[in-house]
Image (cartoon, helix red, strand yellow):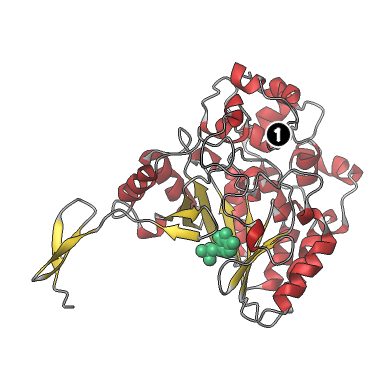
Amino acid sequence: MEPTASLEKETLESEEAAEPPLLTFFSSSRSRAFLKQFYPKATLAEWNDWRWQLKNSITDVQSLSRLITLSPAECSVPDIHPRTLPLRITPYYASLLDRENPDHPLRRSVVPTSDEFVFSPGESRDPLCEDDHSPVPGLVHRYPDRVLFLVTGTCSTFCRYCTRSRMVGKSDNAANNPSRWSAAIDYIQAHPEVRDVLISGGDPLTLPGDALESIVKRLRRIRHVELIRIGTKMPVSLPQRITSSLVSMLKKYHPLWMSIHVTHPEELTPEFEAACARLADAGIPLGSQTVLLKGVNDSIVSLKNLMHGLIKFRVKPYYLYQCDPIPGSSHFRTPVSKGLEMIQGLRGHTSGYAVPTFAIDAPGGGGKIPLLPEYVIGRDEAGIILRNYEGKTFCYPDRQ
Ligand SMILES: *Cc1c(COP(=O)(O)O)cnc(C)c1O
């Protein structure tokens, strides 16, 4: 492999140009085999270049059928349908999909099926009523001291259960427009109660480094903004995006935290691990967010493996979400009792650091509401009666 020659041919932006190719760092043998089989003309250096990955993302069913054997339910999806989210998968993420099994968890999370056209009661385009809590386009101010700043409607890979499927992947998307960023930043500047800004989208790391830096830099100049957080799936869907230049840029704006969207233990690849190592080494505290999905990750074994893997990658499991009722999501939604069962199966049975908070983001815009299995059984004259992780009861001498 002769990476440097082909890298020079690329018209990389200045931020990325000095980036050395990351051959041993980012390319597992699985990636290399996939590249050879499906992109025989591409070099490993191209594969490791996030721009190549974005440019070569799979966006139609026909291209996808070249990589995996589509099932009838997967084939019957029209490429462009106004009510649904477009198809988009990076070649890297496609390399993680099982080619023959349509029930493969990662495949279910990104390959559209006819189930997305089955609409059920209680579903809504904007279940969390984010648009109603939006003082300026692209900014959601729901909680007293923090805001959600949607800086783009683009992702490298679209998750079929996306809570913002109403806005992502749409060309007329307000969030995609940089002039809207200024209005949002002006709002934050004018609201001293905002001490925490969560940059999300879409995926903020799809932006070129200089655009992202201009946003982060302007936020950092606002004195009352204590914390900047970035919500992204890039370390999972396109770990090659976590270049050393991106990380050196971000670390200038500490305290900056990152929440990584992770779904399944099969996403715990050497590439994802390398991306986490770079971020953690730059002092960026990492948290995870996982959506509980029927038939994808709704088993204690699967979630425990995922959480253990995250801890090893220095990612603290943060939230486990009940799936939001977006249109056509019933095939993904579990009963709430399933989430409680998952927490019951983790808490006490493994490191406390590995246990996320199970939450429902309340339809109607109530915000995230945490749920716990019943650990308080009742009270008697001696005190409060508690149940431990093994189901044994204990009394604490609590006086009221
Ligand atoms: C999730 C979310 C936040 C951040 O909530 P935390 O519990 O602090 O992580 C802020 N604003 C909105 C609108 C959100 O949905």
Tell me residue 165's x, y (percent): 66, 44
What is the residue that sits farthest to the left in this orientation? 381
What is the residue that sits farthest to the top in this orientation? 72
Tell me residue 111's x, y (percent): 63, 30
Tell me residue 152's x, y (percent): 74, 54
Q: Mark 1 points at which residue?
A: 87
Quarter of the image where one finds residue 270? top right
In the image, residue 204 above or below residue 65: below
Q: Which residue is drawn at 63% across and 50% down?
A: 235
Give the left or right position of residue 387, taking residue 285 as reference.
left
Tell me residue 120's x, y (percent): 53, 35
Q: Which is more toward the observer, 249 or 123?
A: 123
Give the left or right position of residue 19, taking residue 256 as reference.
right
Give the image quadrant in which the ligand numbered 1 is located: bottom right
Q: What element carries label 1?
A: loop
Label 1 is placed on what type of residue? Leu
In the image, residue 36 above or below residue 155: above
Quarter of the image where one finds residue 197? bottom right
